[in-house]
Amino acid sequence: MTTLRLLLLGGTALAALIPATGRPWAALPLTAVALGALGELWLRALPGAPGPSPFPAVRAGLAALTGLVTVPLIALLLHASGLPVRAVALVLGAAVLTVLLGVFVLVRERVTVLPLPGAPVGLPAQRRPHPVDRPASTAPDRRILPGPVRTGLAVTLPVVLALGVAVVALRALRTGPRPAEPGYLSVALKGWASRVGHPLIVPAGGLRVPVLVTSAGLPVTTAMVRLRVGGVVVAAQPVTFGADTVRTLDIRVPELPADGCLRPVSVSVGTSSAGFYAATRPGVRVQRRIAC
Amino acid sequence: MSATTAGILTGRQNDGPAASPRRARAEAVACAVTLTVAGSAGAAALVVAYRLAEWGSGGEFAWFWTGMLVFTLPAVFWAVRRSSGARLRLAVLIGYACFTYLPKLLRNPAGPLFHDEYAHWGQSHDILLDGRLFEQNPIVRVIGDYPGLHATVASLASLTGLGVWHAALLVLLVAHVLLVLGVAALTAQLWPDPRVAAAAACAYSLNSSFLFFDTQLGYESLAITILVWALTAAVRAVRAGDIPSRLGWSGLTLLLAVTVTATHHLTAIWLTGVLGLLALSLSLHCLADRSLIAATRTGWALTSVTASVVAVWMSAVSPRTDDYLDPYLGRALTQFGGVAGGGQSGRTLFSQSVAPWWEQDAAFAAPGFALLALAGAAVLWWRSRHGAEPLTRAAVAAMLLLGLLYFPATLLILTPSGAEGARRSWAFSYLGLAVAAAPLIVALVDRFHRTAGPALLASCAVVLVGNTAAGMNPSYRFPGPPVFGSDTRASTPEVLAAANWLRTTQGRGARLVADRYTGLIFGSYGEQEPATGSVTFPAYDLYRTPPGRPVPAAVLEQLRSWRFEYLVVDRRMAEQVPDIKIYFETNEPIPHDGKPGFTRAQLAKFDTLPWLIKVYDGPHVAIYRFDFARLGKRAHGGIR
């Protein structure tokens, strides 16, 4: 493929990528084409003519890797420019790089005559050519499919077969019966209570505290819900929790004794508990000072 | 002298007899059918192995290795077979790479599971959300300074709309396939025989990191692929015959070196070291063969520039890398001195391991096979010293030296701090072993084709089993019931629910103190910033303080000044011993004597401290909010 066509291919894929962003089935092949074109442009800009190799897809592998590593390099450039790494910025960065590399390669191709792919790259006069650098055979190829197509098949066929095997294996692994995971019953402060960061002042008439109880992976359970103030149970009631349910309990905390003490207030469900600390409300005269 | 060896000496390409198109097609179809059937059977056996492990029925090791070997051995046969064509070999290697990715894919197809995966997944996720690189990671501090992998994954997720995990799987699969092809491409730069290249790729796949560690969502998984291709480009650079070509390949090498440096510290150091070995070897050979002057200069130039890039990055971008890597080498050498002197700092291999005896025996046998292979490769290199092309001779010498580094590392595995570093080094030293020993493998197959083939396949099986057993714990390789103190089995519904509750009610990014295992979940799925403690920030002293005694003021001051908001307590720390014998971090000052490291009272004391508000509680995990203004105050009773 000529550099101009490669440039157009990469540019078109990047242009189509902006509206396709976020749609995997469209964006994924476009990203692959754009990065493949970028990788190939890197190779044309840096080493130039590839030279043959005993492995047919070495050039393609190198282009794929170079295209892939361009992604973090663009992200680093965006970071250095103070821009966040976002889809549009990445596409624009890739487009700028594609144009720069393409123009560089086009100019280089104009001013220097590069050896054709497959031609021997220059070797030191004092050394015999290494077989890696030998030109490909010029014998007529009697095969039905051209070389690049056969190479493409050699790359895609095992990937497709492997993907098929992997999909079936994954489905077999995920659809069969699995051992039950351990269940739990948890209790948490809810709403405003979950944000309590210091001792609460309980107003006259008490305070309603929302508490979230979650039962997961357990059968229907009846647990004793207890309210403790200062370590003393002030209310208790059995409550039944259905299997895999989330339930909110409204717990009424009574007014605290006006003794100036900091008291723990806790709500326990079975063996789990959550709570906070509470103090006498301000303005209430301390009637009896005790050692807290 | 075998045909292959002669080919190596003379530089003659040895790709077997040219098959007719019809015969080549028939061979390709036979190979595709054979390997598809073998791959399907292998995958089925892997599924059975994981199912057995999930239910705790036993027999998972035998099923796993049956599944692996059912595919890999025929694949190696087709890859190294004389009459296989170049494209067939390529297809087999790609299929081989895809299949060897399957154990890890089946292990956790839906989300992170390994310790480092939580950190890298969280880091990529944060970049996707915030668009910012170089943010400090709460689980593995240093990884934020090496954003190559995370930026790639987050960018692909952002561009394509895939989830972070699926974008990561795509990157990792491509990297794994390119790693296998890269080893073949590198070897093909030294020997023109594609069989040798295929043999090197298969030999490299026997290393301890190949199946699980370098397929996980971790920076090394991408970086090691780039390293191999950077070396391929470097060899092309030193081999180039004219200045533009040399500059071009050098430019490509440096582009890849910069990316390696931005991706993984250890791989960047290894790349510099391998380039240095290549340059050193070229220099020594240049003394006898002046035709290597240009190649030698190129080798040193590449080494110097790569070293400069790595040094600048580590000093300017990530100065903490030194502190992060030091325990793996510095402390390991100290401990190794202790082991050699009969001290107490050694470790017993496979202590309390559930791996079967034959896996353990294979692990001890694997270095022996590696030694034989390296010795044979050295003999072959020495015998071919007069006939081989000078640059190939020098490059193979560098690969032999690289392979030689495998053996000191096997000694470091006897030390607690060095074990991890030793295991991680094998993925690099095995590259030298594989590239250097590949011609020996092909020469043996050609010379003793009736016996060498089966014997080599059997040896490959032993080495693959042994290296994998030595490189990765069974709890990482197989699923199973939840186990306290296991990185891979810490993600119970209860811990996930607690992390989810904290994120949905309190938001992301809160600093909290946690043990290693709840920290993994809160730091990844929970999107918080957990700290598990260190020598300079002994957060674990919160838990260690006996009830009734004050928590050390220095720790409280650190927590207050660094705005820590929550404390997570897993009460199983007072009931069970962690599966991997770590509560917080490797060098924690907590006794490991087979009994739980904490008492129930040590963990229940938090219920009576007025500066801790218990906002969440489950059967095992509780979350407390710090209220430092209440420090020193007393209260009537406790929250429980």
Image: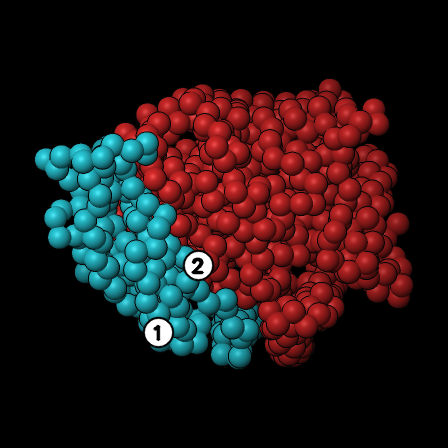
- Residue B145 appears in the rendering: yes
Identify the colour of chain A in the image.
cyan
Query: Viewed as shown, does residue B461 lie left or right of A126?
Result: right
Q: Which numbered dot is residue A271? A: 2
Q: Nearer the viewer, residue A275 or A131?
A: A275
Q: Eyeballing the image, is B254 above or below A37?
A: above
Q: Which residue is mark 1?
A: A240
| Chain letter for the residue marked with disc 2 in the picture | A
Mark 2 vs mark 1: which is more N-terminal?
1
Chain B in the picture: what colour? red
Image spot of residue B431 (x, y percent): 67, 43
Q: Residue furthest left?
A: A283
Residues at marks 2 and 1, common chain?
Answer: yes
Kindly identify the residue that appears in the image at 51 percent across and 62 percent down.
B108
Hey, what amino acid is under mark 1? Answer: Thr
Whole-percent x and y of residue B295?
A: 61, 28
Which subunit holds the residue at mark 1? A
- Vertical placement of B413 versus B361: above or below? above
Tell me the crowding category of disc 1: few under 14, some 14 to 19, or many 20 or more residues within 10 angstroms, Cα based: few
Quadrant hosting residue A99:
top left
Residue B333 location in percent, x, y? 70, 26
At 57% across and 43% down in the image, what residue appears? B599
CA separation in Å, label 2 and label 1: 15 Å
Location of residue B319 by image quarter: top left
Q: Is residue B72 left or right of residue B233?
A: right
